[in-house]
Image: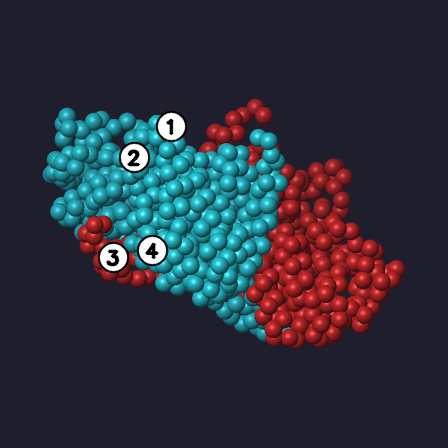
Chain colours: A cyan, B red
Amino acid sequence: MDFNIESYLLEYGKKAKKAAFAMAQAGTELKNKALATVADALIKNTEYIIAENDKDIAEAVNNGIRPAMVDRLKLTAERIAGMAEGLVQLCALPDPVGETIEGFKRPNGLEILKKRVPIGVLGIIFESRPNVTADAAGLCIKSGNACILRGGKEAIHSNLAIASVFSKALAEAGLPADAVQLIDKTDREIATGLMRLNKYVDVLIPRGGAGLIRSVVENSTVPVIQTGTGNCHTYIDASADFDMAKKIVINAKTQRPSVCNAMETLLVHKDIAKDFLPAICAALKEKAVEIRGCDETVGICGDSVVKAEQSDWETEYNDLILALKVVDNIDQAIAHINEYGTGHSEAIVTSSFSAAEQFKREVDAACVYVNASTRFTDGFEFGFGAEIGISNQKLHARGPMGLKELTTVKYVISGDGQCRG
Amino acid sequence: MDFNIESYLLEYGKKAKKAAFAMAQAGTELKNKALATVADALIKNTEYIIAENDKDIAEAVNNGIRPAMVDRLKLTAERIAGMAEGLVQLCALPDPVGETIEGFKRPNGLEILKKRVPIGVLGIIFESRPNVTADAAGLCIKSGNACILRGGKEAIHSNLAIASVFSKALAEAGLPADAVQLIDKTDREIATGLMRLNKYVDVLIPRGGAGLIRSVVENSTVPVIQTGTGNCHTYIDASADFDMAKKIVINAKTQRPSVCNAMETLLVHKDIAKDFLPAICAALKEKAVEIRGCDETVGICGDSVVKAEQSDWETEYNDLILALKVVDNIDQAIAHINEYGTGHSEAIVTSSFSAAEQFKREVDAACVYVNASTRFTDGFEFGFGAEIGISNQKLHARGPMGLKELTTVKYVISGDGQCRG
């Protein structure tokens, strides 16, 4: 490349840091006013945004990108209105900033308050869909942060258009335009540089596929929140209600198979395998689900089931494919989940109190379900409003990450001259 | 090296993961009983531990290590009793595990509880003082975690002795011996390997100097909690009570200059510089503090002050040296702190309500003090009991990290067959 990445990114970093200072001082009313202004501006600039989006679409078609991916890129007046509506909804959510989480007085008279404050500068690296630009920026603004966004090459014109409309509207409303910056180059080295901008970026959040997440975890020296990958299981206990189990299995696998909270492996207690498996396999087949089963499954269901390989237990298909295993008991089910799961969403269907309690206690995951579909792991479904992603790491945030998860704390200590003796 | 680091560490990882599962299920009584058993065992094994420690001391003396460092290594019956006492004190602290932090019911009938659970496997890389082995392991056990410890070469015999006594006593009390493992090799490659053991280590906490912290941040793919470095400031506002200001400055700088919450730079409002500086400089001189001042300071105090270089604003001396700068106003003080501070502990001395409020609001640090010494940033002083370190990053934990900060959360969702529609 013919320019210096470090000094190039440094400019983004410095501007973001400065904007973050102003954002941290901004009150809720101002932030809400700004989000409403941005929402209006997106609608008003629909034509401009679609014209820029057309450039990305043309390039994608030229490059022979498959239609499903082109559709993900495509912005319509309706989709832009959806982004705007998302920002308006953010206005209605409570502002997490300024909350005093704890407060106490020490024997020496010091008063210690633990207050919720914005994190500062968030780096967000994302792929494909350009609506992430508006969604992520909106969450950052409402939570009092500044952000540096780095989207994919395939959506660069759309992303830049949305970000510039966003920034201008922020400034119009009285917030710093630099609170939302989108990096205008998409070289891979720029992403790597952003991952090492420790002086200016407080936290990095990757949004995208397993490859992106892995690359960020591998290369980032900035603290990262991992989101996404979900190898989710549903375990049908011997005591399960068959109708409920069937309903939940079908929902978790087929309602939207491409997402991270969809089920990938079904575990069935051996005592009910002979009765349950034929019924569930037939129901899954009706939904065009390919089943890859263990030996017992193949033994019971015959040719309609493909024999599973070791890799099937490890795979997040994100597709109409299901791994299916018969287990001896709940201990084996939990051990399988803790071995192969990605700590995302895990469910048991049971009518036994002790089985439910054991599953809740022993499964190590962000979200553990009893008698419900794993598909509920989602900021809206949890009532948090919009989410920036679903964390499946254990540091800072676990599960759906809403506005609160984009904040940190500050201890504020007041005294009258206390010294340590 | 003549062995395979990866498979070597994998063994530690697998054992730790297995132990973490058992630890997460252990109740408070069992954990407390185990800690008391370890405390007893440490006392009973005083002779053995001191004999092993003697080997480290002999080596240190042989290698010409300076006496202050040798003293840090040295274990006496009294210091071992101190470690044991630390564990007994942990028993008295509330167990953070099992707490339901939030709970709510969704319109569709799903009940969502947010529960506090152990993190799992903590990797702790530390330097020098062997008492960290017992202190850190004790905190991990009480918070329901397993740990893999990696201490410095200079204390390897002492660390191994303490860890083996610890493990045996855990097993005796009914907890897994592998909940506390100390890596028995001290090659640098082992530390780097531990930093990349993502499948088994959930969080890495370095405890030591700036070099260690930097190396961990640079190399770790496991999520890290940064602790430590403190370039702390005290700002004396124009409205400050001089006696209070003097007392706080002397305490923050001289009560224990080697630690991270000691003051490194003093900022003084220009309106009081002529009156305040001569008095405070004289008092600091009495405590043998070397002062490195800005031009105004040198102008007022003369030869008793060395002229500060740019690097003085950036340096954590951990010594009886103080950088001193006259500022035009509180805005300049806050800007200086936000530019050069490490986000650790920052103080203002003032009698002005608006100055106090502005400082608390605008300074970006883990702990912000009004009219008190920065020296209070400490788990014991905050009333948390023992601490694993002081985080100056914004992710997960900020400020003194006690037992709560060694936990994560799990969402537990109970339903009666809910599916997503």
Residue type at mark 1?
Answer: Asn
Q: Residue furthest right?
A: B303
**Residue tagged 3:** B110
Looking at the rendered structure, the secondary structure element under dot 2 is helix
Question: Does residue B413 appear to the left or right of B165 in the view shown?
Answer: left
Q: Write down the quadrant of residue A161 in the picture.
A: top left
Question: In which quadrant of the rendered image does the C terminus of chain A lie?
Answer: bottom right
Provide residue B225's location: percent of width, then percent of height: 53, 48
Which residue is denoted by mark 1 in the rendering? A63
Residue placed most toward the observer, B272 or A89 = A89
Nearer-the-camera pick, B139 or A116:
A116
Which amino acid does the dot numbered 3 rest on? Answer: Leu
- Per the model, the C-alpha gap separating discs 2 and 4 is 24 Å
Tell me the chain of label 4.
A
Mark 1 crowdedness (10 Å alpha carbons): few <14, some 14-19, many ≥20: few
Badge 2 or badge 4: first in the primary sequence: 2
Query: How crowded is the residue under tag 3: few (<14 C-alpha within 10 Å), some, or many (20+)?
Result: many
Question: In 3D space, how far apart are the residues under numbered discs 1 and 4 (Cα atoms)?
Answer: 32 Å
Q: Position of residue B242 (x, y in %)?
A: 74, 74
Secondary element at image label 4: helix
Q: Dot 3 falls on which chain?
A: B
The residue beneath circle 2 is A68
- The residue sitting at 21% across, 50% down in the picture is B421
Asked whether the residues under marks 1 and 3 belong to the same chain, the reply is: no
Residue kind at label 4, given as amino acid type: Glu
